[in-house]
Image (spheres, grey):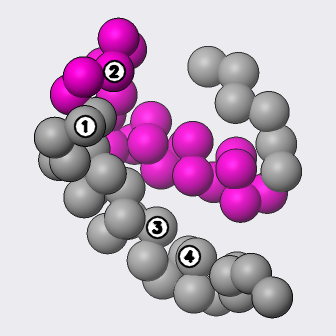
Amino acid sequence: YGVKEEDFNKWVDYISENAVQDACTGSNPRTVSVEEMKKIFTCTFNGEKVDF
């Protein structure tokens, strides 16, 4: 069930880069860098609050 941590760590950079390049991301009121997107995914994966 879910995503293995090993797989998450292997793909998080790739997923973050593609998420930032997605057309829908540009319509968000807040701009986000690849590193910030990676932090968002990491917080979500770990069940942590996104507070930045």
Measuring from the top left, give residue 16's x and y in whole percent.
37, 55
Is 37 one of the magenta-colored residues? yes
* Residue highlighted by disc 4: 9
* Residue highlighted by disc 3: 12
Q: Amino acid at mark 3?
A: Val
Disc 1 crowd rating (10 Å Cα; few below 14, some 14-19, many 20+) is: few
Quadrant occupied by the N terminus: bottom right
Number of labelled discs?
A: 4
Residue closest to the far top:
29
Q: Main secondary structure of the magenta part?
A: helix
In three-dimensional space, the C-alpha distance between marks 1 and 3, rounded to whole angstroms, equals 19 Å
The mark that comes first in sequence, 3 or 2, is 3
Q: Residue 13's image quarter?
A: bottom left
- Residue drawn at (57%, 52%), measured in percent from left and top? 41
Q: Of tags 1 and 3, which is closer to the observer?
A: 1
Q: Amino acid at mark 4?
A: Asn
In three-dimensional space, the C-alpha distance between marks 2 and 4, rounded to whole angstroms, equals 26 Å
In three-dimensional space, the C-alpha distance between marks 1 and 4, rounded to whole angstroms, equals 24 Å
As drawn, the label of residue 24 is 1
